[in-house]
Image (spheres, helix red, strand yellow):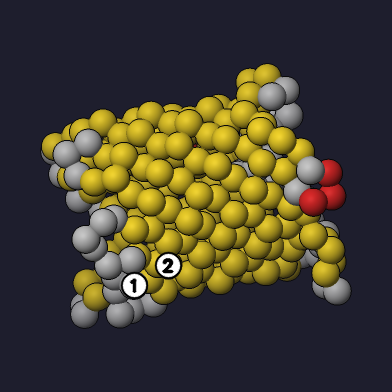
Amino acid sequence: MARQVLIFVLVFTLGTPAWPGAWLREKDSSFTAISVTVFKEEDVYKYKSSLYAEWGLRPKLTIGLDAEEHQDLYGHALIFARVPVTDFGSAGRLAAEFGIGAHHRQYSTWAMYKATLSYGKGIQTGLGAGWLAVDTAIEHRSHEATIHKLDFTAGLSSGRRLDPLLQIETSYVPDRPWYWSARPSVMYRPKTGNLTWILGAERNSARDEIGFKFALWRSY
């Protein structure tokens, strides 16, 4: 499955950084993000890959795909729709997202449903303009669990070649320990083109090792 996802990525991404969450796409505009994170456990390298894509179907409706694969062992693919909830002006905005898809463990597959409420706000700092986003979600995975998630993202969009990005993800399943991951990264924007390159590290509660992440964003 991972190989199929990567082939789709190469086809799909041939075509300014942006961020999802509370922001919707303008009509007929789109955004894609692909990433690979590699961990070394003893003498073995393990990886996870992800594909995120969204498209502005209407002025107040954004649709997309969110897929992640862990070395053909387990993963998910989710189709979603996002709609605005309210706009607080300079105080930020809210949006709601609803998704349906499937998750798998090796060759077994089950249904998956997700509902998300996202808050986003543009910010001004001494280093330039930026944004922050908070996403809270309930994810129901048939045959497995209902997962409660709370994620935080902050970054700068100063117009410089290099800007920082921080992503923190947490999740909780009843009767299991909290899971968290933190990913500090650097965004690099070349002089030409609409690409943004992301290079960062990941530390999470499930592993003792630090992983290294490479991502590519494109909007058009």
Q: Is residue 122 left or right of residue 10?
A: right
What residue is shown at x 22% (from left), y 36% (from top)? 142
- Judging depth in this view, the residue of 57 and 100 nearest the camera is 100
Of label 1 and label 2, which has the lower sequence position?
2
The disc placed on residue 181 is 2
Q: What's the amino acid at mark 2?
A: Ser
In 3D space, how far apart are the residues under numbered discs 1 and 2 (Cα atoms)? 6 Å
Badge 1: how crowded within 10 Å, few (<14), some, or many (20+)? few
Give the amino acid type for the residue marked by disc 1 in the picture.
Ser
Q: Is residue 28 above or below residue 187?
A: above
Residue 193 at least partly seen: no
- Residue for point 73% across, 68% down: 162
Q: Is residue 107 left or right of residue 123?
A: left
For mark 1, what is the residue?
Answer: 205
The x and y percentages for residue 137 are: 46, 46
Seen as rendered, the residue at the extreme left is 107
User: Relative to 216, is 3 on the left or the right?
Assistant: left
> Residue at image x 86%, y 74%?
126
> Tag 1, which secondary structure?
loop
Crowdedness of circle 2 by 10 Å Cα count: few (<14), some, many (20+)?
some
Percent position (x, y) of residue 80? 48, 30
